[in-house]
Image: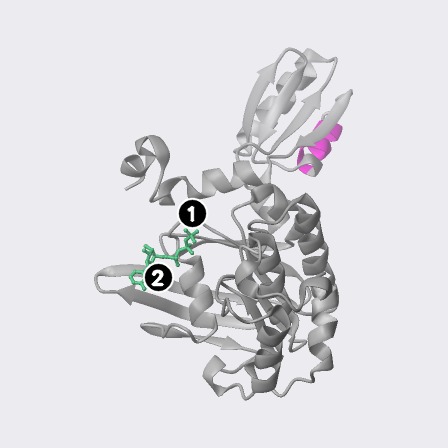
Amino acid sequence: MITLRGLTKRYGAATAVDNLTFDISPGIVTGFLGPNGAGKSTTMRMILGLDRPTSGSVLVGGRQYAALRHPLREIGALLDAKAVHPGRTARNHLLAMARSNGIDRERVDEVLATVGLTEVAGRRAGGFSLGMGQRLGIAGALLGDPPVLMFDEPVNGLDPDGVRWVRQLMRSLAEEGRTVFVSSHLMSEMQLTADHLVVIGRGRLIADAPIEEVIAASSLTAVRVRSPEPSGLAALRERLAARGAGVESRDDELIVTGATVEEVGDLAHGLGLRLHELCTREASLEQAYMELTAGSIEFAAGGRNEEAA
Ligand SMILES: Nc1ncnc2c1ncn2[C@@H]1O[C@H](COP(=O)(O)OP(=O)(O)OP(=O)(O)O)[C@@H](O)[C@H]1O
């Protein structure tokens, strides 16, 4: 569990992280989303005690990072895959980390095997490709077998096989009951990986909800209902509108927003309306995300940032 309470970070006059309060729960993958400059990395750095909050607090397993005796055994993190001494071999890099945290040497070979770097363990990390560096960073996060794991853009630079591997790894770490907190700009990947989402923009919390709720809240998520009875369909339309749902009519169908498929089905049943189709048309996470963050984009192509400011 990671607990943030009123977490705030200011750099001079700029507020990078603005009063964030949320919990990151164990047993699920929590995706951390937000436009460039939203404050994701700054938040993650404060969780790891690398940046000091201006105000508010953050606890890992109920304790401050600085109070953890063997931090790598409590929280493993991949923040910057390039933060490795380039002259060190992959194995020596991990051995140094293990030594400073009272972790057995054998564990180094275990994690090297887990991330698929056994064969190159004796090579200097400075010569690693982006993807190999990411794998080494993930090995470092796993080293202490910690209950809490945090990954900043873990699939950056990975090939499709690597992306799939990271997805499966995140899922299995969560299934083992660990807390998994992962940032990404790849919405399609997040949709496949995350159970819960925390979305921030300009340092502020925009959403903290299960992924299905974020998608259901999109204006592009709608219920489609089709019937061969025009008068019944018109009656259904009236009932839905009276409840505040958005309804669009087209030939023999209605497209309904702001009502669940169950509500539409029950109303149709109440009217004795014969249906030929009743289904949900779901927005993609990308569509839901774009709507959520539309007002929070700082760095946009085509001048959208001016509109948002
Ligand atoms: N050391 C620093 N000094 C001054 N400003 C900083 C510093 N670190 C971050 N910032 C500012 O804080 C804001 C948040 O940056 P941060 O890197 O946390 O965003 P992010 O969500 O991780 O972005 P990205 O998706 O581009 O990685 C940005 O406006 C950034 O310029």
Q: Residue lying furthest left in this view?
A: 13
Residue that label 2 marks: 18
As helix, strand or loop, the secondary structure at mark 2 comes to strand
Q: Main secondary structure of the magenta part?
A: helix
Point 61% across, 81% down: residue = 98
Q: Position of residue 286 (x, y in %)?
A: 55, 39
Secondary structure at badge 1 equals: loop
Answer few, some or many: residues within 10 Å of disc 1's Cα (few below 14, many 20 plus, some between 14 and 19). many
On residue 35, the disc is: 1
Residue drawn at x 64%, y 10% as measured from the top left:
251
Q: Which residues are magenta?
A: 263-270
Looking at the image, residue 153 lies above or below residue 100: above
Chain-order first, disc 1 or disc 2: 2
Q: Number of marks in the image?
A: 2
User: Badge 2, how many Cα within 10 Å: few under 14, some, many 20+?
Assistant: many
Q: Is residue 178 magenta?
A: no
> Residue visible at 64% across and 59% down?
29
Q: Quadrant of the C terminus?
A: top left
Residue 77 percent across, percent down from the top left: 56, 68
The amino acid at mark 2 is Asp
| Rendering quadrant holding ligand 1 | bottom left
On the picture, is 169 further left or further right than 64? right
Q: CA distance from mark 1 to mark 2?
A: 15 Å
108 sits left or right of 134 in the view: right
Residue at image position (36%, 62%) is 17
The answer to whether residue 218 is seen in the rendering is no
Q: Which mark is residue 152?
A: none
Q: In the rendered structure, does residue 264 fall within the stretch colored magenta?
A: yes
Question: Is the residue indicated by label 1 positioned so its CB lies within 8 Å of ligand 1?
Answer: yes
Q: Quadrant of residue 2?
A: bottom right
Considering the image in quadrants, where does the N terminus appear?
A: bottom right
